[in-house]
Image (cartoon, rainbow, N blue to C red):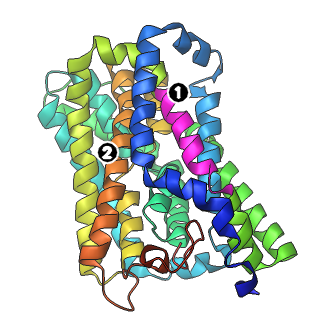
Amino acid sequence: MTTKYERKPTRTTSPLSSFDRFLTLWIFIAILAGVSTGFFVPSISVFWERFGVGTSNIPIAIGLILMMFPPLAKVRYGKLPKVFGNIKLIALSLVQNWIVGPLVMFVLAVLLLPDKPDMMVGVILVGLARCIAMVLVWNDLAKGDADLAAGLVAFNAVFQVLFYSVYAYCFVTILPRLFGFATTPVKISIGEIATTVLTYLGIPFLAGAIAHVGIARAKGEDWYRARFLPRISWLTPAALLFTVFVMFSLKGKAFVQLPMDLIRVAIPLALYFAIMFFTTLFVSRRLGSGYAESATVAFTAGSNDFELAIAVAVSVFGIASGTAFAAVVGPLVEVPVLIGLVTVALSLRRRWFAVPGSDGAPDASEAGKTPPGVPSQGV
């Protein structure tokens, strides 16, 4: 049955495959188009803001949900219990996400933004919000372990609901006082955090699980992976480009008018993403993990939940505050940096993990043995 469907996806997915090879270029074009449109057509931000509900923007929410659906549809949900059996990787992820990550961002913010306490707080809020959304896209593009990514994201979602408000109080209200900074009490309820998590993670998670269980049961697992998944894979890059354009067009004018503030906020954020990614990838490799697992843990540690950070910054400090500005800059820095790290990860896959027979060995699609677009076994 597998043989029957092996060659047909080639025609369906080859155009997307060509597009994927230049995805980094298209993303930078979308960034440039967004900034240019936001600056030269400032009314576009008013247009996008019409679709705001509370601190959420409906077009951005739709883009995020659509881009996460294909990666979550790839997950073998029956194998999720086995994911949590890998104690070493789960422990590494928890330590990096909930101990090392917040502390690294706090130190970078205090050292690099001591004269901008409002923007410093915005950067800290980004560091506290662990990624539950776009990490699935970065992991998918980098050929990470989809099952492990889903498990770690679910773990972070639970921890986020339970502990984000506590973390925000400690890192924004208590710790800055030790360094002589004035502080503002941060009040955000578990219910508000749960709403954000359920919107951006719950909807695509449920859609992916229903698609897998329903379609695979009706048509068979081979048909589902050889036919259905390649046909929906275009949603991820298309929705990503749309979301990037909307985000950058919303703040295009601010980028041009406040370039130094943008650069100053971007520096600690970029350093944070790189530090967390490379240290986690290195430690995971030292623990004996293969490429797919190591990449997944690294991207989980090196990306953040900007929706939650922006929501907290706007609701507590106001939309015109430096804190909200810094939180908004978060995803605008994360997108190009993480796209660059995807390229780096795929390069390191061949150098660090190219051991015959291991998870890190280049898969058949790279060796030209599998038609472009056909999901490999590890993804």
Magenta residues span 232-247
Image point (30%, 82%), residue name:
354
Asked if residue 100 is positioned above or below residue 315 in the image, the reply reads below
Left or right relative to 2: residue 253: left
Secondary structure that dominates the magenta span: helix
Position in image of residue 263 (x %, y %): 22, 27
Image point (36%, 57%), residue name:
342
Q: Foreground: 318 or 68?
A: 68
The local crowd at label 1, few if under 14, some if 14 to 19, many if 20 or more residues have their Cα within 10 Å, is many
Identify the residue at the far right of this view. Answer: 218
- What is the three-letter code of the residue carrying label 1? Val
**Circle 1 SS class:** helix
Give the quarter of the image for residue 367. bottom left
- What is the three-letter code of the residue carrying label 2? Val
Picture disc at residue 246? 1
Left or right relative to 92: residue 188: right
Q: In the rendered image, is residue 318 in sight?
A: no
- From the image, tell me which residue sits under label 2: 337
Q: Of label 2 and label 1, which has the lower sequence position?
A: 1
Q: CA distance from mark 2 to mark 1?
A: 18 Å
Position in image of residue 33 (x %, y %): 44, 25
The local crowd at label 2, few if under 14, some if 14 to 19, many if 20 or more residues have their Cα within 10 Å, is some
Image point (27%, 56%), residue name:
276
Position in image of residue 326 (x %, y %): 33, 27
Give the quarter of the image for residue 222. bottom right
Position in image of residue 196 (x %, y %): 59, 40
Asked if residue 361 is positioned above or below residue 315 in the image, the reply reads below
Q: In the rendered image, is residue 323 in sight?
A: yes
Image quadrant for the N terminus? bottom right
